[in-house]
Image (cartoon, grey):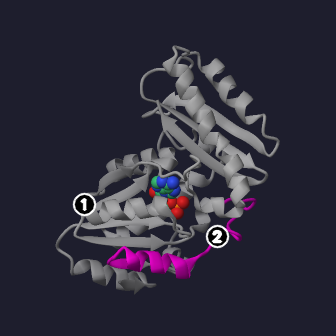
Amino acid sequence: MKTFHLVSDCIAWRKNIVNTVGFVPTMGALHAGHVSLIKSSKKNCNKTLVSIYINPSQFSQEEDLGSYPKTIKEDLKILKGLNVDAVFLPSDNEIYPEDKPDNFTYENSLFKKLEGKSRPHFFYGVTKVVSRLFNIVSPTHTFFGEKDAQQSRIINQMIKDLNYNIRFISCPTVRSENGLALSSRNNYLSHSEQKQASVVYRGLKLVEENIKKGNVNVNQLKKVFTSMINKNQNIQIDYISIACNETLEELTIWSKNSLISVAIFYKNVRLIDNIVV
Ligand code: AMP
């Protein structure tokens, strides 16, 4: 497995590949969710490159940039075990060189919805780093997780808007046995806290059950979720949304293939999850 720290080395590696290159951007602390994306890339592409970079521009000052889990030794072991071709581990200065202009501006109609309401800076930072990584890696395919559904929609749209010649592949959410969506931020929680936090998925499934029984009133469906979650003192709901899966417009009446997405705080750890019903 090639390991690159420099943009120039990554570009040089890419230049010699004529076949397909799958790219999986991550922030590390790898888990089975990341592994599923990498396996999909290995299946679909001749070469696979994974990046591990904790991108400062997507964190606000109040967020957990400083404490974000770092498990680089274990990550590299996982990547080697998966026979990944190359890993890119850039420093901040490689991605955001001080002597180069930082003038990337991109926005689409999905930025200010859902996560964007709670984290207004977030998608500006995500699109900035993903665009830079796309420019460096020049992948033919890229793999993102449905766990971050809005991020997936936004990157897919950015690929179209900025004419990147990259095939976007969305991969299903991987969950632990109790249903909790795997996330690097789960590392902040003990095993028993993770078990408690899994009520979020049960809440989403209860909403789905209600829809299947014919309840299509979005306010009532949201109440079903909140009353289940509010039984847990440690959990606070940031938002629950039932929206069009493409435009992310909020609905008042459920319609087929809606995105039901939530963000919660378990104590001070922010977790997100979603299902499509
Ligand atoms: P992150 O390292 O959290 O920035 O995530 C890197 C990629 O892995 C993103 O495309 C995420 O959507 C994806 N991902 C994270 N958690 C999961 C999961 N539980 N299942 C599937 N994909 C995931």
Membership of 37 in magenta stretch: no
Q: Residue 52 at x, y = what percent? A: 49, 72
| Secondary element at tag 2 | loop
Q: Residue 267 at x, y = what percent? A: 79, 51
- Ligand 1 under 8 Å from disc 1 Cβ: no
Residue 25 visible within the image: yes
Q: Residue 234 carries which label?
A: none
Residue 104 visible within the image: no
Q: Residue at (35%, 72%) from the top-left corner?
A: 49
In the displayed structure, 91 sits above or below 103; it is below
| Secondary element at tag 1 | helix
Could you tell me how far apart the alpha carbons at marks 2 and 1 are, in whole angstroms? Answer: 29 Å
* Residue 41 in the figure: left or right of residue 92: left
* 154 or 2, nearer to the observer: 2
In the displayed structure, 45 sits above or below 150; it is below
Q: Residue at (46%, 80%) from the top-left corner?
A: 77
Q: Residue 261 at x, y = what percent? A: 57, 37
In the displayed structure, 210 sits above or below 114; it is above
Query: Which residues fall within the magenta stretch?
Result: 59-86
Q: Quadrant of residue 62?
A: bottom right
* Residue 175 in the figure: left or right of residue 25: right
Q: Which amino acid does label 2 sit on?
A: Pro
State which tag comes first along the sequence, 2 or 1: 1
Q: Residue at (21%, 77%) from the top-left corner?
A: 17
Q: Residue at (48%, 52%) from the top-left corner?
A: 174
Say which residue label 2 marks.
Answer: 69
Q: Which amino acid does label 1 sit on?
A: Asn
Q: Residue 43 at x, y = what percent? A: 26, 62
Q: Quadrant of residue 138?
A: bottom left
Q: How crowded is mark 2: few (under 14 residues within 10 Å), some or many (20 or more)?
A: some
Q: Residue 44 carries which label?
A: 1
